[in-house]
Image (tube, helix red, strand yellow):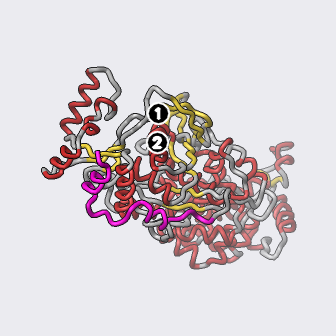
């Protein structure tokens, strides 16, 4: 067959040849060790934890090697595309602070970064394969392909379009021309030159050396609508965008023979592949893949609703990327993710167990290391969107809010009761009079019969001095309660309980309940400093009416 005639027949209006695009997208001017990675999702839904992890891995390796990390939207399967799919992906990634060097919204020299906008590029490369005798048109209908599948099942053969079952290979130029004149639908297929019985050695960045069968399937390169399949599009794009490393789920491992064959037939060097293990979840003794359908922690909306910091999520993902990162992070403050030396060899070959409890632990550590001012700025966007009322409260007096957030934050063991932004309100609402004086917040159920309101009120009226240091404050408090038969220490009380009404801890408990509506609070001294004496007495006064 005259390949030039066939190529011209199939692409009579081809604008540019392959060489034109190779000149348009030259090799990147980067250090030889710099990695060029990408995140290439399909616009078929929202970002989930598995895809976020894949993008994070690519982000880390590109940036720690001073390379390039770009976003490419693979939308060639337009039947599965959802409304606003591209916008959803970009929005989700922005919310999780995954930043790209190039992509659909920021541009770059290697765009367009949406595959449906690169149709002419794929045609040029298919044209080139046809010229070399590595591709051909096939005109089977869906019905004929179904009949082929049933025949292979009957013969107990592998399902697919290959060998003697690849009837399109036998078409003459005249046959093809007649089909085209009849306007018959067709696809462009690869003319595979592998033998399935032959094995070749493939080295994966994570999994190491693997034996794989050679590809003999004449896969579809261009579909009936003229758009490429994933297999072909990603090969062309990774070549032209000069991708050095492809990070993807290990469900794609079986496709490696096809992809490497395509690179070889195109005559170009393939990128290195890193097939990451799936994120898994342990249910009792059973371990299964993290599920978008069943597991709340798989959906990014869960983290956004809870207010789990994006930086905390990335810190946790870094521990999945390399297990030794956790010790590094906990032992180094401040510690940046990119300061750590990640290596492919330390990545999990099997499934990586996703542990929400561990994530929240690391989130507590992360939030405890922030300054009060930094934490205040982080929570503002969350409450502006999720709780406008509390947002208005905390912004009405930013100075006081920062003081509240700073309680027990600057010592050797800073407080770690904040794991999410929601926890801020949960553990500080009582410091705001707006919330404290709402009837629904009054701690009636916590007030015990033995609580002595008059004793507490008298203390704050006659003894408490906001100017006292913590040491002076505590000593004066113990002297005061001692006069009313309260032990200065718990030890004294336990030694002779019949002698006392209670101990210093009981008195502090009364303060906590009356003033902060809780049995547990951070340091009382610091909280009282923020409230001021006038506000304290105002709060105590309402209990006379209860």
The one nearer the camera, 477 or 362, is 362
Q: Quadrant of the C terminus?
A: bottom right
Q: Which residue is mark 2?
A: 261
Q: Are marks 2 and 1 in contact (CB under 8 Å)?
A: yes
Magenta region, residue range:
1-29
Secondary structure, mark 2, is: helix
SS state under label 1: loop
The percent coordinates of residue 347 (x first, y second) are: 64, 42
Between 238 and 128, the one lying in front of the other is 128
Q: Position of residue 128 (x, y in %)?
A: 38, 54
Q: What residue sits right under mark 1 in the picture?
A: 214
* Image quadrant in which you'd find residue 336: bottom right
Question: Does the magenta segment cover residue 7?
Answer: yes
Residue furthest to the front in view is: 2
Residue in the picture at 81% in, 44% down: 497
Name the residue rendered at 31%, 63% in the picture. 14
Please, is residue 267 above or below residue 435 in the view? above
In percent of the image, x 74 and y 73: which residue is there? Answer: 461
* 112 lies left or right of 444: left
The residue positioned farthest toward the left in the image shown: 182
Task: Give the total of numbered labels.
Answer: 2
Q: Is the residue 279 above or below the residue 329 in the image?
A: above
Residue 359, placed above or below residue 64: above
Q: Earlier in the sequence, mark 2 or mark 1?
A: 1
How many C-alpha atoms fall within 10 Å of the one at disc 1: few (<14), some, or many (≥20)?
many
């Amino acid at each position: 067959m005259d390949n030039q005639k066939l190529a011209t027949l199939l692409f009579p209006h081809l604008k540019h040849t392959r060489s034109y695009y190779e000149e348009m997208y030259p090799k990147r001017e980067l250090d030889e060790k710099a990695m060029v990675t990408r995140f290439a999702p399909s616009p078929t839904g929202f970002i989930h934890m598995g895809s976020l992890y894949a993008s994070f891995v690519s982000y880390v390796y590109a940036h720690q090697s001073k390379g390039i990390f770009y976003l490419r939207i693979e939308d060639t399967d337009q039947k599965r595309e959802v409304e606003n799919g591209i916008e959803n992906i970009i929005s989700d990634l922005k919310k999780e602070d995954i930043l790209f060097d190039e992509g659909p919204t920021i541009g770059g020299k290697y765009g367009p970064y949406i595959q449906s906008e690169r149709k002419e590029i794929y045609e040029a490369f298919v044209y080139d394969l046809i010229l070399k005798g590595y591709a051909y048109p096939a005109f089977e209908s869906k019905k004929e392909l179904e009949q082929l599948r049933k025949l292979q099942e009957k013969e107990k053969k592998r399902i697919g379009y290959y060998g003697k079952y690849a009837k399109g290979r036998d078409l003459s130029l005249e046959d093809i021309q007649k089909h085209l004149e009849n306007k018959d639908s067709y696809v462009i297929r690869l003319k595979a030159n592998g033998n399935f019985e032959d094995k070749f050695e493939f080295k994966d960045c994570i999994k190491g050396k693997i034996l794989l069968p050679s590809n003999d399937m004449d896969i579809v390169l261009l579909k009936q609508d003229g758009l490429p399949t994933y297999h072909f599009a990603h090969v062309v794009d990774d070549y032209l965008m000069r991708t050095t490393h492809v990070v993807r789920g290990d469900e794609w491992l079986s496709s490696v023979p096809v992809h490497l064959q395509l690179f070889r037939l195109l005559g170009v060097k393939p990128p290195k592949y890193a097939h990451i293990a799936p994120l898994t979840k342990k249910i009792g003794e059973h371990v299964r893949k993290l599920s978008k359908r069943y597991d709340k922690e798989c959906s990014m909306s869960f983290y956004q609703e809870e207010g789990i910091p994006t930086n905390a999520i990335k810190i946790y993902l870094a521990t999945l990327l390399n297990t030794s990162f956790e010790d590094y992070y906990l032992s180094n403050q401040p510690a940046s993710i990119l300061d750590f030396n990640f290596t492919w060899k330390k990545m999990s070959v099997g499934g990586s167990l996703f542990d929400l409890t561990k994530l929240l632990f690391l989130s507590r550590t992360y939030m405890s290391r922030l300054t009060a001012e930094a934490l205040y700025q982080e929570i503002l966007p969350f409450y502006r969107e999720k709780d406008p009322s509390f947002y208005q409260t905390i912004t009405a007096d930013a100075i006081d809010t920062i003081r509240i957030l700073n309680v027990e934050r600057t010592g050797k063991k800073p407080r770690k009761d904040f794991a999410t932004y929601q926890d801020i309100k949960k553990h500080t609402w009582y410091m705001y009079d707006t919330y404290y004086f709402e009837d629904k917040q009054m701690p009636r159920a916590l007030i015990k019969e033995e609580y002595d309101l008059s004793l507490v009120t008298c203390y704050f009226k006659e003894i408490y001095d906001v100017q006292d240091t913590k040491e002076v404050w505590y000593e004066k408090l113990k002297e005061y309660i001692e006069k009313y038969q309260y032990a200065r220490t718990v030890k004294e009380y336990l030694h002779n309980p019949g002698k006392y009404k209670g101990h210093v801890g009981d008195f502090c408990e009364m303060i906590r309940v009356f003033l902060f509506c809780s049995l547990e609070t951070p340091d009382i001294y610091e909280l009282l400093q923020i409230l001021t004496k006038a506000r304290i007495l105002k709060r105590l006064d309402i209990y006379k009416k209860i």
